[in-house]
Amino acid sequence: MSPTFDLRSLLERVEAAPPIDAVTAVADQLAELSGATEVSFLIADFSGHALVRLGTAVRAPEGSRVQGAEHAETLPLEGTVHEQVLRTQRAEVESLAGGTVRMIVPVTDRGDAIGLLELVLPEPPDREMHAAVRAAGHALAYVIIANRRHTDLFEWGQRTTPFSLAAEIQRRLLPPAFTCEAGQFTLAGWLEPAATVGGDTFDYALDRDCLQVSISDAVGHEVGAALLATLLVGSLRNERRRGAGLAEQTRNANDALAQHAAPGQFVTGQVLRVDLSTNRAQVVNAGHPLPLRLRAGRVEEVPLLVDLPFGVQEGLEYRLQEFPLEPGDRVVFVTDGMQERNAVELDVAAALAASSGLHPREVVHSLGAAVMRATGGELTDDATVVCLDWYGGPQRPRESDGGADRRLASS
């Protein structure tokens, strides 16, 4: 592969292929240009603990899931080079027998780790080839983002365990990307679902001058809780997208729940709005657990006034509270599933204090894994966490390298 790797030619081949063959088109082009004997894409599954190798080989690997011509081979992550690349978002090259090498590069966009691209090359890549393959991995992220709108292949591959109807509804309420890196902040979220879905959601939106983040927990379980969460998230998004301010968004979302949900049904939540031009933040706290803040090595709850949950009282005006943000702050928003009665061994504050060297996406994964260990994997309520690292200062571009921020990638 030359340093003048033809991205345009690659995208033209992708556009000519059916959406279900988009990854195959990229793999074929890479094999031709690099001399790779094998090229495969591994997508991160929804559990966060495995990768799934997608393929259409005539003979599927033993233990693979098969659907028509497609097969999906699940590979554990823990302790592997794949885990290292996915965690750090840095490419790795390892030697194989006969002088060949395996190159593994992250498929990532703004810090959101979609999966990995794996190539078997006849010899170690030089600097130019190394850079070109990394660029191809980043391009593949956009290919997948664009083409998954037209096919269920990627969604099917990521589902290493079947979804219930409630889980399907809940999945649709979550943002398309769980991580977002920007010049002034990095944000990551994660949801560990209970055996019976508990109605948790998180969401965010980044506009030219504003970041808005929400976290919520609907009362009840399964389809009822998922539908209640749908009312709140749909209303908040609708209000936000028509340009309403934070006070109007939350007031109208509350009224929508009060009008359409059954008596006694409600949703707790917090909605944060950060003005990126002034660095000023405001929050509404609707009966939700207080956020935690890591500042200068010390963890403490962010003191907030508590208003009624959404849906309890129609016509309620929520108080807009100043949310104190300083450069260097790490703020974690949680649902009460992170404080489960059967998770008594989990000290979220202590875990947060020990997270200072981690990227936000690692923070949310590690906290999710910690609550699963503490409960023996038997959550009675969803456990959701959102981590916001605030750098502050003026609006500015990221220092991007293949889809990840060079300043934030782990070493």
Image (cartoon, helix red, strand yellow):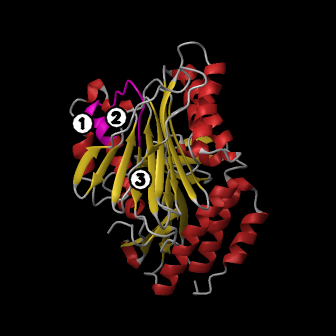
Please state which of residues 85 and 249 is positioned toward the viewer in this rendering.
249
x and y percentages locating residue 107 in the rendered image = 52, 63
Seen as rendered, the residue at the extreme top is 263
Query: What is the quadrant of the N terminus in the image?
Result: bottom right
Which amino acid does the dot numbered 1 rest on?
Leu
Range shown magenta:
369-385
Looking at the rendering, which quadrant does residue 345 occupy? top left
Q: Nearer the viewer, mark 3 or mark 1?
A: 3
- Give above or below for 99 relative to 299: below
For this view, does 262 lie left or right of residue 346?
right
Which amino acid does the dot numbered 2 rest on?
Met
x and y percentages locating residue 271 in the rendered image = 50, 41
Q: Kindly report the distance in space between the C-alpha atoms of the residues bearing marks 2 and 1.
A: 8 Å
- Give above or below for 254 relative to 387: above
Q: SS for tag 1?
A: loop
Determine which residue is flagged by label 1: 346
Tell me what residue is drawn at x 46 percent, y 86 percent: 127
Number of the label disc, if any, that sits on residue 338: 2
Number of the label disc, if any, that sits on residue 388: 3
